[in-house]
Each structure stands twice: as C-alpha cells, then as structure tokens.
Amino acid sequence: MDKNTYDQFGYDEAIDFILNFLKKNGKVTTDEVENATKKVGKRCPDATVLFLATLKMKGIIKGEFSESHHGWVWWV
C-alpha cells in the first residue's frame, strides 16, 4: 500500500497515538512507528520521520540517531 491508501491522522490524534505507542514500547525506530500507524490504517500528518522530529524539537518526545539501528530511535 502506498501512503495515499492510508487515512491521515489529525495532528492531535497523531500525537496521542505516538505517545501511547512509545509509552507502551519504549525506544522504537521510525519504521516501527510507521508500521504501527499503518496497522491502524493511518499515517502521520507529515512524513513520519519529519513529524517525529517536530515532536522532538517541541520537547514532546525524545530521539537520537542510532548507528546500530541505522536510523533514528524515539522514546518518551
């Protein structure tokens, strides 16, 4: 499925979903967040990594680049 197949989360709905997912799962990769949103038939308001980076810049979540995961990991 391409990104147009999924409904877009509302901004606040996306934040709630991501916070709940991170609280439940600890440190996760961008791909894991994206796969979780796809499981519920949704997508972030922006590209997942950009949306997560925005949340990080606002202090809502934490994140860092992980060489072992070859990408970003996110947590609360």
Image (spheres, rainbow, N blue to C red):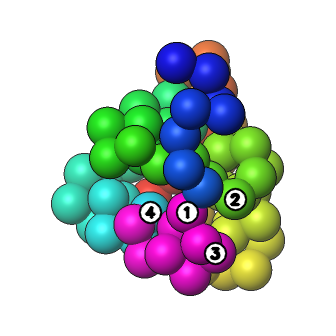
Q: Is residue 47 above or below residue 17?
A: above
Q: Is residue 25 above or below residue 55?
A: above
Q: Is residue 33 above or below residue 12?
A: above
Q: Which mark is residue 48?
A: none
Q: Amino acid at mark 2?
A: Pro
Q: Which mark is residue 18?
A: 4
- Residue span colored magenta: 9-17
Among numbered discs 4 and 1, the one appearing first in the sequence: 1
Give the residue number, with chain letter if any, for mark 1: 9
Among numbered discs 2 and 3, the one appearing first in the sequence: 3
Give how far apart the Cα atoms at labels 3 and 4 are.
Answer: 11 Å
Q: Position of residue 47 (x, y in %)?
A: 74, 43
User: Quarter-wise, where is residue 76 in the image?
Assistant: bottom left
User: In the image shown, does 34 or 58 lie closer to the viewer?
Assistant: 34
Mark 3 or 4: in front is 3
Q: Which mark is residue 45?
A: 2
10 Å crowding of disc 2: few (<14), some (14-19), many (20+):
some
Q: Amino acid at mark 1?
A: Phe
Residues at circles 3 and 1 in contact by the CB criterion of under 8 Å: yes
Q: Position of residue 11 (x, y in %)?
A: 64, 75
Residues at circles 4 and 1 in contact by the CB criterion of under 8 Å: no
Mark count = 4
Among numbered discs 2 and 4, the one appearing first in the sequence: 4
Disc 4, SS: helix
Left or right: 57 in relation to 45: right
Q: Residue at x 59, y 72 (%)?
A: 10
10 Å crowding of disc 4: few (<14), some (14-19), many (20+):
many
Q: Residue at x 69, y 59 (%)?
A: 45
